[in-house]
Image (spheres, rainbow, N blue to C red):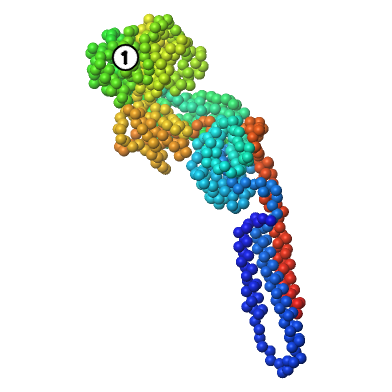
Amino acid sequence: MSFLYPQFLYGLVMLSIPVIVHLFNFRRTRKVYFSNSRFLQQVKDSKSARQKLKHLLIMLSRLLFILFLVMAFAQPFIPSKELEEQQEFAYIYLDNSLSMSNQVANDLSAFDQAIQKVEKILDLYPTEARFKLLTNDFSSPLRIFRSKEEILDMLTEIKPTGVQRSFEDIWQRLNYQASSATADWYFISDFQKATFKGIEHFSGDSVQNYVFVPQIFNNTANVFIDSVYLKNPFLIANDQNSIELRMRNTGSEPVTDLVVTLAIDDKQVANAGIDLPAHGEATTEINLNFPLEGNNPAKLSFEEFPVSFDNDFYFNLNLSQQVSVLEIKNVNESTAVSKVYGNKKLFDFRSYHINNLDYPSVDQADLVILNAVELTASLTDRLVAMINSGGNLLIVPSTNPNVSVLQRLAPFTAVKIHQDTSMVNLEAPSLQHPFFQDIFDDQKSDLISMPRVRNTITWSSQRGDNLLIGKNGVPYLSADFRGQVYLLGSPLKPDYSSLPQHAIFVPVMYKIAALSKAFDRKLYHTTDEQVIKIRLDSIGGNELFTMSNGDEEIVPNQRILGKELYLEVPSEVIRPGFYYLNAPTGPVEVISYNNNHQESLLEQYSVDELTQSLSGVNITILDENDFDQFTERILQARTGVPLWKYMVLLAILCLVAEVLLIRFLK
């Protein structure tokens, strides 16, 4: 026999009360004076024996009444065989991602329903059971097991978060802190296909009990902003430009006349309408025909329910400043480089013959271009110092380059003279590469006609990044991983390259110039980016930068390399919105954050898909009906054969017996 609430057994100390009453009340005697007791002695002895028996029976009935009453509160039961197999430890993963705000049955959010299910799971276990609870924040300590009351307290503090976790991350986190004892494992999630990856590789442990509890959405339709970019990446005051935004509709019904509003510095300035086909996407634009100054936090908003966590999109509009470009050449005539950077609104372009070079201008330039020149030792030293201080360099080799000098300026390569003099076509660039993003309107790179080139040098760039490669596998344009030094494979002459005459030449050169200037920053970041890079025109080596959004201040891990600031931002504390980057001297930059749009893709693994993916694993998968049946079955198993009703009945019988003894036993 076991007890559901064994703590009530402490009430058995009350059994001492009837004993005390018996000792100090029933044993009390009194004297009776009588004239002649010779004939009463035999009657007295008989009465005393019966009175003692009566007192003992009354005390026994009282003792049994208290015993059965305490037992009734402790709720004794005969445990079932299934309860004997229940574990003393349980691990619970609760998905608190933003997608859990979608509605499920009874018009509840999936998150609220998941909280209720965790509470029901806790009720399945006895008081002495111990638990570990994990959420997407990965902030709850898993080193020790917690009691049921502690887990209930933790549930009141859990909030939805934009942090996404794959199943592999969740399992590694839980399993790393797991004990060797057999336990029950509960995974309560919406099981999104876009984010809950790696579940098909789960093998588990045959001695553990795994329970998957999917939260099934009423509807997986959703509308969200997929990406935002500027039609012209160079945003110049009083110049015509527009914001291009691409939106997606994951629902089976088209969305018409959806109004998207643009607010800059918390003031609504424009709006646009858009029609979205079912299971499709569309693009619209908003003209920037109003004055802008400096740094402009901007927000795009629309109304769409019931999924509303992705109805706002934050980004930053930075006005472009002139990029200082210095060309060092060995000819006196105009070059292809000077024609590219001829826009005086964008570029402060200067071109010098190497014999007439103004050396201080090297340190003042954002980008230095060596156009087929042979360098002196002093100029090489100055360029190396410029690179080490955060400057940018584009190297265009001559027809007979000095390999040792090139190796010193581009240490990420192993340069040598290229022996093959044949012309080859370049491979089309990868449009997924960050360098080429937003350069081409057409997303099919294999349709792009590429120029023909003839390398004078070749290299292996194990520590660099190949941007353009010939069809013979020889790199033609490479950069170091910091994006400071770029190396071209041949001179920009018709005999060696048709690149200057090709349409790709201008955007590539513009991109190199843009990356050399501090204003070339991403319009926005996603909350799951662990490291972000910000280029600043002036930065001190010992400055401490902080991030604030009005409600809180964050001091991220940071390091400075030249003019670039690298921030390691804890994803679990970042929320969508604007964060102001502050230096000791004051605000420096505005950083815009959005959730990764993968969270907006609400398609789920069905119960059948989970069952198929996890075949062969000791897993129980419970939908809504199965979960209720599961909890009811466990509760019945936990109570086994309840005996408390019999205890109450016996307590009443003992109470009645006491009354009868007092009233009728003379």
Q: Nearer the viewer, residue 94 or 411?
A: 411
Q: Nearer the viewer, residue 296 or 409?
A: 409
Residue plotted at (47% across, 10% down): 471
Residue plotted at (48% across, 21% down): 432
Circle 1 crowding by C-alpha within 10 Å: few under 14, some 14–19, many from 20: few
Residue plotted at (59% across, 39% down): 187
Work out whether residue 611 can be spotted. Answer: yes
- Left or right of residue 123: residue 309: left
Where is the N terminus found, in terms of image quarters?
Answer: bottom right
Q: Which residue is mark 1?
A: 404
Residue plotted at (65% across, 55% down): 4
- Left or right of residue 345: residue 424: right
- Left or right of residue 155: residue 54: right
Type of amino acid at the residue the image marks with label 1: Ser
Image coords of residue 616 (percent x, y): 66, 33
Query: What is the secondary structure assignment of the residue under circle 1?
Result: helix
